Image (cartoon, grey):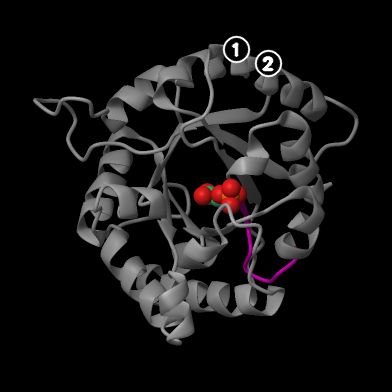
Amino acid sequence: MARVKALVAGNWKMNGVKASKKEVAALAKRLAGTQKPDCDVLICPPATIVSTLKDAAKGSKIAIGGQDCHAKESGAHTGDISAEMLKDAGASHVIVGHSERRADHGETDAAVRAKAEAAHRAGLTAIVCVGETEAERDAGATLKVIRGQLKGSLPDGATAKTTVIAYEPVWAIGTGRTPTPDDVAKVHAAIRKALEARFGAEGTKMRILYGGSVKPANAKELMAVPNVNGALVGGASLKAEDFWGIISAYL
Ligand code: PGA
């Protein structure tokens, strides 16, 4: 198994205003302490505060990302934000195809793929989310669903530098429920296999994050699962102390 440096990413969703920069400052202080976690750290706030948080993160190892982008660079798309705009605001990453966007905005695999391509065009790393619903899981269709989403959502030419996969079972997001480490291992092994089959050596190195109710209390166990190369964290990324508790899995 290739040694892949972990990424712990926070997805703030529709939470955070300018004053939230105090959480970034508190986390930066933690990261500047004597205990150095062996992972990269990313926060994806609402687009309105990407540049504010980028300023607050200055001098620290905290990277800032967006939560979604339009497929086009510019144009008549009221309310949308392009990958180039996120880059200009200071982002280095963008989440695409989060299950909340797939559900709330009807984003298809093809739409997600176009957004990932836009991220690459703008020089951003795309964090491409996949995950089964509870009904799909109950029907025994988890791996089939995940393979289909990967096939449809990942652009050709994706590399380990430009692309991160986040496996987030929809039923585990914001619910406090998580799959067992064995279940996570099975899905992540299947994702790794699919990535290697399609992208060769790059697929061996691509990060595969686990997301869905990751907390300080379960992070160590989940992050120790083979082929889990970090976490995508929602609720527990909003407060610096909670997020640090998860990052601490890599101390
Ligand atoms: P959660 O969200 O950690 O609050 O479950 C994860 C996500 O949706 O990325």
Q: Which residue is mark 1?
A: 19
Magenta residue check for 229: yes
Q: Give the x, y percent position of residue 198.
A: 36, 72
Q: Residues within 10 Å of mark 1 (few under 14, many from 20)?
A: few
Q: Give the x, y percent position of residue 162.
A: 41, 47
Horizontally, residue 197 falls left or right of residue 227, namely left
Horizontally, residue 225 falls left or right of residue 199, namely right
As helix, strand or loop, the secondary structure at mark 1 comes to helix
Q: Which residue is mark 2?
A: 22
Most common SS among magenta residues: loop
Horizontally, residue 162 falls left or right of residue 149, namely right
As helix, strand or loop, the secondary structure at mark 2 comes to helix
Q: Are marks 2 and 1 in contact (CB under 8 Å)?
A: yes
Q: Which residue is found at the position 45% from the left and 62% from the top?
A: 202
Tag 1: amino acid = Ala
Q: Which residue is found at the position 17% from the left and 35% from the top?
A: 72
Quarter of the image with the N terminus is bottom right
Q: Give the x, y percent position of residue 139.
A: 42, 86
Q: Is residue 232 visible?
A: no
Residue 163 or 45: which is nearer the viewer? 45
Q: Is residue 173 visible?
A: yes
Q: Which residues are magenta?
A: 224-231
Q: Which residue is found at the position 68% from the left and 71% from the top?
A: 226
Question: How much space separates mark 2 and mark 1, taking CA atoms?
Answer: 6 Å
Tag 2: amino acid = Lys
